[in-house]
Amino acid sequence: MMSGLLVASGGCRRTETRKAYRIAVVTKALDSEFWLMLKQGAEAAARAHPEVDVVVLAPEREINIDQQVAILEDQILKKASALVVAPAGAAEVIPVLNKAKAAGIPVLLVDTDAPWPEKLSYIGTDNRLGGKLAGEYIVRTLEGEGKVAVIRGILGVAAHEDRVAGFQEALARAPGIRLVTIQPANSERALAMTVMENILTSHPDIRAVFATNDQMALGAMEAIAARNLTGKIILVGFDATREAVRAVKAGQMHAVVAQHPFEMGRRAVEAAIKVLRGEPIERRIDTGTTLVTRENAEGFLREGGTP
């Protein structure tokens, strides 16, 4: 076992019966509700297929891209039957995905797409649409006028690039809205709190903030609360973890764009199994995007939201 890496074995326990396939699901981290829900979805798919062994692995933090590369190289050496990967950084990860392809290991991407033509499928959210939903909500709530900011994930990661692009697309239709800054916080709550504090100092008249995942939105929420500005600055997150949806319900945040990580994990493993059986799969499997506001937060929580 590699030092410094988080490893969570999958839903099927190894028994004396040899498994037909071993699928490695490699995410960016396992340090948040989002990734744990994706893991649970992958494990649920494994339980439905006793012939399949699923293992879920991840670096300690999303910023530790070198650790993700090391995990992938190790799984290639161990001859995994298939890889399901959420690329932490396309430039660093694509070369090792090419190694997997050369070794005859099928690769599917989950949660985060990458410009790699050899992927068999991308399973996840339409991130550009999600960013657009966030932008349209802010434009409506501000009635087309005001300064806004973005707190975003790691530079170069396709999911966050697409969310920012969709957000900017929505704002472009409202000339009275001014995007004053886009600041990275690497999908980390504590860092986002510091970034938000700096934004409030530099732009005391800021009226809205879009954070491209919920961990950063929750960090921003804490900084806003510390200045007694809760409810006065529109705050929109992305993921719809239960903590974030509860914050929306309580009025501490205004909205979150919902992803469905459980479905991502489940459908990605199901697609990998089909590939291993020689069955066709779709090149893109959309797991859905929804805007959660105070009006529908209770129903979202009651229905399980992210199962």
Image (cartoon, rainbow, N blue to C red):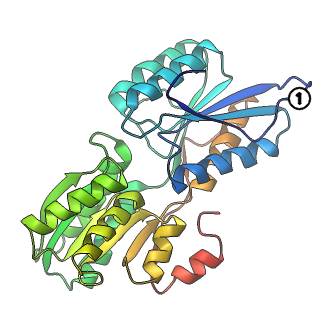
Q: Position of residue 205 (x, y in %)?
A: 10, 77
Where does the C terminus fall, quadrant-wise? bottom right
Quarter of the N terminus within the rendering: top right
- Residue at 29% over, 39% down: 156
Q: Position of residue 256 (x, y in %)?
A: 42, 70
Which amino acid, by three-letter code, is at mark 1?
Thr
Q: Nearer the viewer, residue 210 or 117?
A: 210
Instruction: Give the percent coordinates (x, y) of residue 237.
Output: 37, 66
In what element is the residue under mark 1? loop
**Relative to residue 147, is residue 37 drawn left or right?**
right
Residue 178 at what x, y percent from top left?
Answer: 11, 70
Say if residue 279 shows up in the picture: no
Residue lying farthest to the left in this orientation: 202
Q: Is residue 297 visible?
A: yes
Residue at the limit of the structure toward the front, as seen here: 226
Which residue is located at x 64 percent, y 70 percent?
A: 304
Q: Residue at (27%, 63%) from the top-left corner? A: 167
Q: Which residue is mark 1?
A: 15
Q: Is residue 237 left or right of residue 227?
A: right
- Compared to residue 74, the image places residue 6 above or below, namely below
- For disc 1, the neighbor class at 10 Å (few under 14, some 14 to 19, many from 20) is few
Give the answer, above or below, for where 213 lies relative to 69. Answer: below
202 relative to 266, above or below? below
Residue in the foreground of this view, choosing between 68 and 105 = 68
Task: Indicate the quadrant where residue 108 lies.
Answer: top right
